[in-house]
């Protein structure tokens, strides 16, 4: 069975030009509307397909799926079915939405199944069990190493051997639209003898993509780079909020802690690996040669256009960065293979973020730390103001989409407002 939706496929649903949610995408999310419980949906154009209602209408195979897979708080129960069943469901939805198909289109209660996105609230699509953050963009690692250590030895000796990562905190991963409070914590001003305590002064975003996993293998076993895609459901945009001054003071010797775990924001729709498979590209040549367990065949980078904008309170947004997920040095298959090489088990709903995605050009850097070069080069906003880092009441917006041969699939956006410290 093919998991791809052919390039010539058309849908009877109206899809606006430049929509992220074409028939070729069909991402999964969790939504609610007034008076109804949370449920799973698939986005198409400006609509959501209510999968629980579709199930009730008899258009989903009741031998393969249960109502609880769709009328649920999160997608985890559905994801526990694994790659084959989730892929098959998406292909079935594509079939129902295809131009010549009338099974769904002809139903008298279609307005209960195909709902306006403007009428629903989106929720966190998965209960995130464990969250891991990698550090896999070479340009980002070089920029940070240059700024904080030594331009001549910007990469630490392990960087080209290990997809470096750390375990983050899942409790503070929130959905797009959730406001974030500026965190408080300890900082040590450059010329001071002693640390001070107070609201973070150098609040930053990190432009990342994250993949969401299926259940893995039993503890003790590993997932190879060749198997990785069988264990990944899809991806979201990931804003890994970072408090740079707290980070600088706390990160030695065990790495980031309170500078990172106060919030990370994600986009609501999980774009499947099946949909993204059409946008694969070759990654960077890896030199020195990696260990065999990190070696891989085929293209494992993905051409996803990324953009970050800052919207000051009461003003129009300014795009401050344009990057691309293809710039990753370590790809998702290597990240998952590395994560499990010691036998660490993964579960449905685990989230693994890429690390800040910076490109080679200054305009493609994925954090304010790099864009403003540690505050030395303020970024001009359209309203005349300047930003070195994020100010109170700024809204940070990240968008992502892939496009090839006139076919576009996208992630929508993750949008979050920074409120003052409590
Ligand atoms: Ca990060």
Image: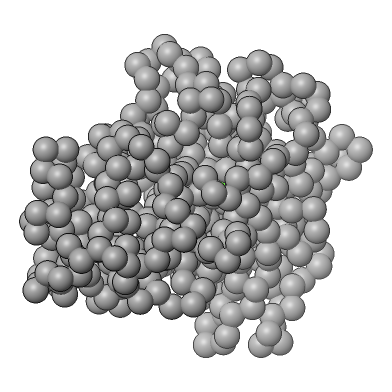
**Residue 415 shown left or right of residue 120 in the figure:** right
**Residue at point 57% right, 59% down?**
402
- In this view, which residue lies farthest toward the front? 100
The x and y percentages for residue 187 are: 63, 51
The answer to which quarter of the image holds residue 388 is: bottom right
| The C terminus: image quadrant | bottom left
**Render colour scheme:** one colour
Hey, which residue is sitting farthest right in the picture? 152
Relative horizontal placement of residue 412, taking residue 116 as reference (left or right): right
The reply to whether residue 243 is visible in this rendering is: no
Which residue appears at 43% of the width and 13% of the height?
A: 221
State the count of labels.
0
**255 versus 194 height, above or below:** above
Q: Nearer the viewer, residue 206 or 23?
A: 23
User: Is there any visible trace of residue 22 in the rendered image?
Assistant: yes
Residue 372 picture location, percent across and down: 76, 64
Q: Image quarter for residue 9?
A: bottom left
Picture layout, residue 43 above or below residue 350: below
Residue projecting furthest to the top: 220
Vertical placement of residue 197 versus 422, above or below: above
Measured as percent of width and height from the top left, residue 229 is found at 47, 33
Q: Quadrant of the N terminus?
A: top left
- Image position of 15 (left or right of 281): left
The part of the image, by quadrant, that contains residue 94 is bottom left
Q: Residue sitting at 83 percent across and 45 percent down?
A: 146
**Residue at (20% x, 70% y) in the render:** 105
Q: Is residue 34 above or below residue 272?
A: below
């Amino acid at each position: 069975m093919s998991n791809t939706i052919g390039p010539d496929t058309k849908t009877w649903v109206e899809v606006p030009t430049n929509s992220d949610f074409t028939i070729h995408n069909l991402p999964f999310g969790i939504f609610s509307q007034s008076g109804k419980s949370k449920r799973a949906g698939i986005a198409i154009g400006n609509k959501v397909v209510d999968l629980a209602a579709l199930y009730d209408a008899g258009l989903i195979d009741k031998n393969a799926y249960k109502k609880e897979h769709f009328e649920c708080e999160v997608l985890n129960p559905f994801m526990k079915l694994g790659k084959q069943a989730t892929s098959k469901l998406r292909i079935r939805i594509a079939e129902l939405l295809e131009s010549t198909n009338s099974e769904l289109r002809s139903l008298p209660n279609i307005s209960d199944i195909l709902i306006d996105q403007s009428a629903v609230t989106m929720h966190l699509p998965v209960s995130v069990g464990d969250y891991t953050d990698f550090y896999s963009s070479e340009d980002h690692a070089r920029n940070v190493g240059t700024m904080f250590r030594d331009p001549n030895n910007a990469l630490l000796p392990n960087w080209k051997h290990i997809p470096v990562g750390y375990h983050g905190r899942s409790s503070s991963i929130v959905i797009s639209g959730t406001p974030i409070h500026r965190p408080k914590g300890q900082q040590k001003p450059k010329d001071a003898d002693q640390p001070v305590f107070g609201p973070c002064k150098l609040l930053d975003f990190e432009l990342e993509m994250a993949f969401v996993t299926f259940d893995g293998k039993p503890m003790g076993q590993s997932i190879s780079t060749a198997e990785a895609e069988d264990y990944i459901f899809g991806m979201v945009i990931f804003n890994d909020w970072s408090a740079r001054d707290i980070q600088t003071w706390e990160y030695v010797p065990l790495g980031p802690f309170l500078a990172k775990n106060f919030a990370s924001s994600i986009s609501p729709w999980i774009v499947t690996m099946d949909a993204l498979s059409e946008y694969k590209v070759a990654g960077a040549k890896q030199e020195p040669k990696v260990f065999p367990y990190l070696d891989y065949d085929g293209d494992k980078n993905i051409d996803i256009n990324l953009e970050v904008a800052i919207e000051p309170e009461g003003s129009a947004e300014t795009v401050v960065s344009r990057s691309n997920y293809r710039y990753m040095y370590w790809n998702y298959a290597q990240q998952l293979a590395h994560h499990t090489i010691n036998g660490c088990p993964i579960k449905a709903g685990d989230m693994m973020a890429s690390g800040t995605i910076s490109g080679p050009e200054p305009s493609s850097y994925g954090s304010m730390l790099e864009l403003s070069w540690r505050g030395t080069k303020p970024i001009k906003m359209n309203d005349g103001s300047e930003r070195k880092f994020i100010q109170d009441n700024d809204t940070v917006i990240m968008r992502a989409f892939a496009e090839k041969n006139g076919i576009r699939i996208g992630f929508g956006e993750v949008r979050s407002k920074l409120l003052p410290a409590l």
